[in-house]
Amino acid sequence: MTRCALKNTEIIKKSSLSVLKLNTFETSKKITTIMPETILVIGACGQIGTELTMKLRDLYGPDNVIAGDIREGNETLMASGPFEQLDATDLKAIEEVVMHYEVDTVYLMAAMLSATAEKFPMRAWNLNMNSLFNVLNLAKEKKIERIFWPSSIAVFGTTTPQNDTPQTTIMEPSTVYGISKQTGERWCEYYFNKYGVDVRSIRYPGLISYKTLPGGGTTDYAVDIYIEALKEQKYECFLSENTALPMMYMDDAIRATLELMQAPAENLTIRSAYNLAGLSFTPKDISKIIKSHIPEFEITYNPDYRQAIADSWPSSIDDSAARKDWNWKTEFDLEKTSKAMLNGLKES
């Protein structure tokens, strides 16, 4: 295990946390005081983990947020604070990091995503499930206080209502990734009810970001299409033109995650995973928006094995429980998302 940290800095122990200046997390409706704590992000170098880690370091201070992953991330992430080379399936290694830094909260972002998991089902099951058990058991033993673990719309299946999918409904996932996430939800709720573990979760829709490349998901087209539009002015989509899927711009997803983690425990009625809605659009919809910015852009369609995965997922999500319990509200529509993606990619 390799330890890296910022030069000329020291890890701030809990005995000195009281002298830290409190940070604030601004939302569209409120400003929440962020109390100092020590956080470990496992899977910190992935698509979500990278941006989440950077935001957490902005809020809590770089030395109070430890990035952990099996391999190093981009230069910006690596230069911004402590890093631990960490295998999410290695309980002993995770426990060592937790005890060394006196970690309060773990964000477990390590996972094998939907398309890749279909190719390597047993590896996906091992990573997605054993990593979760590792942190749940550390919390059960009172070695950490809180856990965030992401679920996904992949928990749903073809028998699930496709439009405005309810919070509580039929869940018969047909993918390895979805099966692991549905199983994880059940274990999270079990550990909360049986052992009082404060674990919180969101069923992420497809996530869109220009800062970190996606890592093998079925909704990856919604990132690739912007990249190819700027680079080649054309894109061949692996989904059919009218495949509607729930999506969300990464800034909204990060904000939702932080708002959920800052919500008072007594307000939370869901301990499996909250539905979360942002956008719902088709490849045809997104291509029209891009064409309004890049008139020469052309799209073609060549559905592959990922089409069957997409067909098993909802078209739109009912997130009324999240809105009621912790005042969730999306900010990015498709036009605003597209502008942010195109401008961000041009500047990066």
Image (spheres, grey):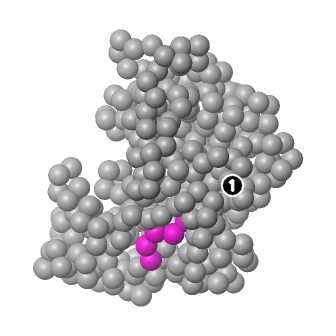
Where disc 1 sits, the SS reads loop
Residue closer to the observer: 117 or 326: 326
* Magenta extent: 275-280
Relative image position of residue 258 (x, y in whole percent): 51, 47
Report the residue that reaches farthest toward the left.
296
Identify the residue under disc 1.
268
- Find out whether residue 124 is within the magenta segment: no
Q: Position of residue 257 (x, y in %)?
A: 52, 51
Give the residue furthest to the right. Answer: 194
Q: Is residue 278 magenta?
A: yes
Asked if residue 95 lies left or right of residue 284, the reply is right
Foreground of the two, 164 or 43: 164
- Left of 221 or right of it: where is 13? right
Query: Image height check: is 195 above or below 218?
Result: above
Give residue 193's position: percent from left, percent from top.
Answer: 83, 50
Q: Amino acid at mark 1?
A: Leu
Q: Residue at x 13, y 79 (%)?
A: 296
Residue at 69%, 31% (x, y): give it. Answer: 144
The vertical placement of 20 against 128, above or below, is above
Q: Is residue 140 left or right of residue 100?
A: right
Q: Residue at x 31, y 34 (%)?
A: 75
Answer yes or no: is residue 17 visible: yes
Residue 9: where, in percent of width, then height? Answer: 39, 14
- 300 versus 37 height, above or below: below
Left or right position of 128 against 137: left
